[in-house]
Image: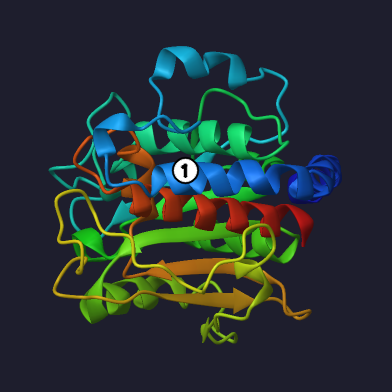
Amino acid sequence: MILLSRALSLNSLHRRIARASACACLLVLGLALTLDAQAQVLGAPQRAERNSALARGPADLEPLFDEAGEFNFVRVRFNTYFNGGGFRGGFRGGMGDGPWAIDFPDADINFLRGVSRLTNIRVMSEPIVLGFDNPQIFDYPFLYMLEVGQGGGIVLSAAETENLRQYLLRGGFLLIDDFWGQRQWDAFYAAFSQVFPDREIVELPPEHEIFHVYYDIDGPQMIPALYRSDEYGEQGINSASNHAILDDEGRVMVLINWNSDMGDGWEHTYHPDYPTRYANAAYRLGINYLMYSLTH
């Protein structure tokens, strides 16, 4: 019964946010020139002169937040095979260590700022961290997780697996980001195939609507981490791919951003050494994924 009530709440939230998204889409023509201008500024080589709407300090961005906002960023906390999530080297901020916490909270907050500036969606100020077994995930249409190949791969309990399966089938959307190479893919797949053992993971072509729902993007984009080469990401990889798990109607339930790191693009928006074109690509992709999740 809890799942049913949460599903109704999720559907209601989808409808409310879809209306906001529709308003945003009506503004596309009016925003087009502004967005193009911002893209040109973000792509300029003078990284120290980031004068775009995104590249400002935190203080002047606070008015963007709305405590009654219709979208909040929900990051998924998960365990790995090693030490139940005790990965050493990630974020330490009072909620425990683990690959799930890399880039937190800067990436989450900056993405919320970007959504507020570049769309008509009202956002909330504080990102949320939840586990898949928490029934509160049904209150939110968009979930984010990353580094799913670290620490030997993710570990999902029976409760997490079932709750996630129901969440996705009832209209939820999960974005998986920032894991690299075949070994990390295999570690991720070993656990995640339990969620939908009867559904294939398919590669999305550049013409898929998710790349064109708001911004017109030429398919997946390889976004490297800070201080990586301009030509290569991690492990000598120089191209990204997007994969998905689809529902029976062909809707993307799970978007897998493989060999790319959008989180670093969001986290390092203000960093003078992070190439602006990658930060710009990270916002464009992220907003497209969000718009798709709210309207499908």
**Is residue 90 left or right of 263 when viewed as pictured?**
left
Q: Residue at x 68, y 53 (%)?
A: 291
Query: In this orientation, which residue lies closer to the viewer: 42 or 244?
Result: 42
Is 87 left or right of 112, judged from the image as shown? left
The answer to whether any part of residue 184 appears in the image is yes
Q: Secondary structure at mark 1?
A: strand
Quarter of the figure with the C terminus: bottom right
Vertical relation: 219 (above or below) 157:
below
33 relative to 241, above or below: above
Residue at screen point 27% across, 25% down:
93
Residue 133, how many percent across, how many down? 54, 48
Going by the numbered disc 1, the residue's amino acid type is Arg
Q: Name the quadrant containing residue 68.
A: top right
Residue 148 in sight in this render:
no
Dot 1 corresponds to which residue? 75
Residue 195, above or below 176: below
Instruction: Please state if 252 lies on the left or on the right of 264 as rendered.
Output: right
Q: Residue at x 58, y 51 (%)?
A: 287
Which residue is at the front of the view, 293 or 43? 43
Residue sitting nearer the eye, 162 or 189 = 189
Which is nearer the eye, 32 or 284?
Answer: 32
- Crowding around mark 1 (Cα neighbors within 10 Å: few <14, some 14 to 19, many 20+) is many
Question: Who's the residue at 27% across and 40% down the image?
Answer: 46
